[in-house]
Amino acid sequence: MDEILEIKRERIENDFKMLETFTDPEAPWTRRAFSSQNKEARKWLADQFRAAGLDVYNDAASNLIGRRGGEGDQVFMMGSHSDTVIEGGRFDGIVGVLGALEIARCLQDSDIELSLPLEIVDFTCEEPTVPISPVGSRIIAGDITQKDLEGVITPFGDTIHKAIDDLGGDSSDISKAKRALGQIVGYLELHIEQGAVLEKEELAAGIVTAIAGPCRGTVQFIGQPEHAGGTPMPDRKDALVAAAELVIAIEKIVTTTGMSEENVGTVGWMNVSPNMINVIPGQVDMSVEVRSTDLESLVLVRKSLEEEVEKISEKRKIESKLTWDHLEDPVPLPLFMQDVVKSAFTDLSIPIKYLPSRASHDAARIAPITPAGMVFIRCLEGKSHCPEEWASMDDIVLGIRLLGQSLLRLNENFLKNKKG
Ligand code: GLV
Ligand code: MN
Ligand code: MN
């Protein structure tokens, strides 16, 4: 199939320049979900969606949605997220949102009507800004329900209810944002790889086969705060030493021989109390996160982590509590969606490369209710979630062309199946 969309590089460059201005001035490339920068960026995005001829609305989950093609229950969907982690995310999520926007503009420029309405989405709070993240795509899939919102507070001190409402949602009944199985006929997402597979193979783009399941929890160790000079070493109940043991144990667990090479594990956050130079740490609260694209391995990793917390706490005679906040299984992307994306690569004469995603995406969260396909583009040295995150404009433009062509192929596929 010929390429008919005329992707315009200058428009995309301009979008990136504009969206980048909505950042926390103290921390470059920071636009956390529910922050003032997130709200301002959303207003700008909504204006761009409107200028692309889209009908713009926020669903109850405050996902920002632009729609073309009129009424109808069934849609094609494309999107990603414009929120970021702290000091990271110039491209993470953003290429997917701005890519979808550019395709909407191209459809408008060429007056192309698809066989179904198209919705492009900036999903609310994909990054783990609140413990129930990703918020928007999980609500669409019905994976977060009203009672899950209870007690959730944003880092800016608001209830999640207020935060969702301030972004244009309706937290009094988030079920209104849920889509039934079959309503989203196909979902496509463009994203940076956030790994270095493509770069190492000198490839600009790849087809995603599966998305690793991040499992996130909190561990609390409660020991005894005491005088750092007066307490002999054998008498101590030092919560931070227990935490340190767990950090090392997680690294060992995920790298144990025989386990999947796809396993990863991280302690990214820790709160030490009372956090004073001359007091033995009495309490540590820490995050634990393990991921894999291999389900059996992931289940084993979770079990080993639970056992390790018990072991450390018994050995050191201190209390411990592990709470899993969020468990996800790896998500294989449907073969026919991989084929849809592959045909776009073939149309554009781009070498075919399949690869799994170790990072997670909105695509994984809405996959239970719709077939999802993903295009990856390479990013510099695989770096992401840091200020150095970088993708070249050449690769971004190619990624958007592949995303657009995938949409046309999806449309063609849908028509063929309808005719039977
Ligand atoms: C999303 O950014 C993730 O943590 O994979
Ligand atoms: Mn991210
Ligand atoms: Mn992302």
Image: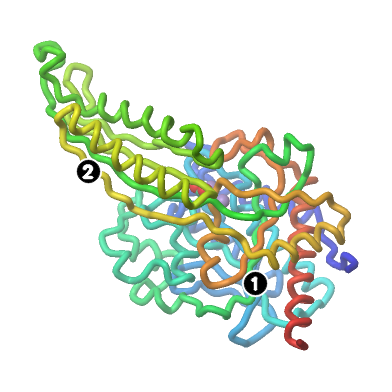
Q: Is residue 331 above or below residue 220?
A: below
- Outermost residue toward the front? 258
Instruction: Judge the density around disc 1: few (<14), some (14-19), many (≥20) Cα neighbours within 10 Å.
Output: many
Tell me if residue 25 can be seen: no
Please state if 311 lies on the left or on the right of 57 as rendered. Answer: left
Which numbered disc flags the more N-terminal residue, 1 or 2? 1
Residue plotted at (25% across, 31% down):
272
How far apart, in angstroms, are the residues tagged by discs 1 and 2? 41 Å
Visual colour scheme: rainbow
Please state if 342 lies on the left or on the right of 285 as rendered. Answer: right
Residue 238 picture location, percent across and down: 19, 24
Assign the C terminus to one quadrant of the image.
Answer: bottom right
Residue 84 picture location, percent across and down: 52, 48
Instruction: Judge the density around disc 2: few (<14), some (14-19), many (≥20) Cα neighbours within 10 Å.
Output: some
Corner quadrant of residue 207 = bottom right
Residue plotted at (19% across, 28% down):
315
At mark 1, the secondary structure is strand
Q: How many numbered circles does the render carry?
A: 2
Tell me if residue 286 can be seen: yes
Q: Amino acid at mark 2?
A: Lys
Assign the N terminus to one quadrant of the image.
Answer: bottom right
What residue sits right under mark 1 in the picture? 186
Numbered disc in front, either 1 or 2? 2
Q: Is residue 162 above or below residue 316?
A: below
Residue plotted at (14% across, 20% down):
236
Q: Which mark is residue 321?
A: 2
Q: Amino acid at mark 1?
A: Gly
